[in-house]
Structures are given as C-alpha cells and as structure tokens.
Amino acid sequence: MVCKEDVVSWFKELESYKRIDAMCTLLNMCLPFELRFIGTYLEELGKRDFQELRGAELRANNPADLAADIGGADTDSRTRRKMALYVSLLRSCNFVCATTLYNAMVSLEQSGLLKGLYGDLLEEILLLYTMALHHPAFTFDQKSHFGDILEKLKIEDQRIQYQEQQEHINVAPVSACHSQTSITPNMSVPPPNLSGLGPPPGLMFVKASVVQPTSSDAVPELSSPSVLATAGGMVPILSEVPHPPPGLPIPQYNVGEYLGQHAWPANIIVSTLNQPLEVCIS
C-alpha cells in the first residue's frame, strides 16, 4: 500500500517539469465533480500570488507585448525563463499569443540550442515544452510537435543522469584467480556427526527401571549385541548412538534407510503396535 507521506516525499524531490507532468496525468484521471472542486480549490490558492503575477499575466496575453519580450533573443537565458513564465500565465482561449509562443519555440529549436543541453538549461527547456504540451491554447499539431521534441529531450536527460550515476559508482576490482580449498585424492573425510539424529517418526523413548518384553521371547542381556524385534524376527542393530537432546527437531527420513545407515542405542527394544511405537530404555 502506498502511503500519502511517501507520495508527498516523492513529489517534493521531482524536477519542476516532472511535477507538472504528474499533476496533469492525475487530473486527467479525476471525475467531473472532482475536477470542479479542484478548480475551485486552485482558484483560491491562486489568489495568494495574484497581485505579484498580475503584470506578467497582462503581458503574456497581449500579442504586442509578448512579441516584444520574447522576439530576437532566442539564446538569452532571461528570455527563456520569461517564455516559460508566459506559457504558465497564458489563458486557455488566447490562440493568438499561443501561436506567437509556438513560433518562438520553433525558432529556439532551429537555432540548435536544444542540442547538447545539460544541467539547469536542460531543465528549463524541459519545463517549457512540458507546459506547452499540456496547455489547451495550443492546437493538436502544435502539441504533437512539442511532444516529439520533448521525447528527444527526455532521452538526453536520461543519458546524462546515467552517466552521472556511473561516475559515482566505485567498482571494486575482482581478481581473476579465486582461492579454492585444495583437496588431495588421499584426504580422509571425517565421519558425519550423528549426535543430532533421532529415531524415525512414530517412535518415542520411554524410560523405565525394568524393560518389559512385549512377547514371550527372551530379552537379551545389555552386554549382548542389540537387536530389533520385528514381525520377521530379530534384526541386529549397530553400536549405540546417543539420542538427540530435547528440543531439537526430528529429521524426516525413511525407516528402512534409517535402519540400514544409522545406529540405534544398544539397550532398546522396538515392538510393532497399532498406536505410535514406543521405545523402552532401561
């Protein structure tokens, strides 16, 4: 789930042109009554800086003043910032001034200034073309042209960001020779540790002072070789191995494989029962 705080934090770190693009995308997804409310809310917010931007708004929507402010100085940084400001203050129905701004932006492209951009200059141009792309005063053909230029600028911006990231990455040198543990053919392998093994599932140890046989067969002495009582007779068992301490999980395995590979305590007798098997230890 995306939290509101995460979205706000992400939005604050974006560049200006990315914030404009994100807000326009979100507004296009709103319902009609939501848009009317947002419009009323934005109108109230706009009153904060209304007087400060009043003069620039009048010049942005006057064809004569607009042509005088942005004409003849395509490469001037002050003029480019003024163009971005005028696009933001342009009224949605002022198609004459929109055409003037479009011609100025086309002249900006033809001058070759859009090639090799980086840093703040690239962000200024991206902001200018992003606002023009979403502004309703421009025609569809004009917006299509802005979109083509904007895609090229975004690719250039991504390329620059990728190069900056690569410069800050410190790649540790990796040796071609890796040390490996040498193993000789005659090396003896130590036996596995069987202290953690337990009886097969279904068996449990029952401590008793005297071992009670489950049949009339004689119980072998403790000193004699240990046997396992089964339906087919007595099966000898290997030397004893201590049972696992309490609290350790019992591994899952096959009983037949267990009897053939692992040893049991020497003083136990296992009998076949319908209920879970019991193992008696004296």
Image: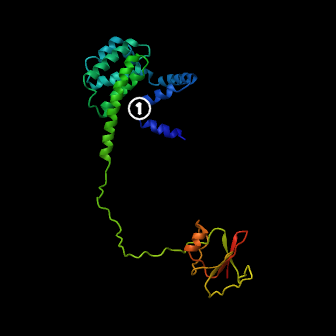
Name which residue lies at 31% across and 16% down: 103
Which quarter shows the C terminus?
A: bottom right
The colouring scheme, among rainbow, by chain, secondary structure or one colour, is rainbow
Q: Quadrant of residue 228?
A: bottom right
Q: Looking at the image, can residue 257 be seen? A: yes
Q: Which residue is mark 1?
A: 18
Q: Position of residue 74 (x, y in %)?
A: 27, 21
Name which residue lies at 41% across and 32% down: 18
Question: Relative to 87, is 169 above or below?
Answer: below
Q: Amino acid at mark 1?
A: Lys
Residue extending farthest front: 232
Q: Looking at the image, can residue 55 be seen? A: no
Q: Quadrant of residue 206?
A: bottom right
Q: Position of residue 124 (x, y in %)?
A: 33, 29
Q: Position of residue 245 (x, y in %)?
A: 59, 74
Name which residue lies at 26% across and 29% down: 115
Name which residue lies at 32% across and 48% down: 169
Q: Secondary structure at mark 1?
A: helix
Q: Is residue 186 left or right of residue 263?
A: left
Which quarter shows the N terminus?
A: top right
Total labels: the figure holds 1
Q: Is residue 76 left or right of residue 216?
A: left
Question: Relative to 37, is 246 above or below?
Answer: below
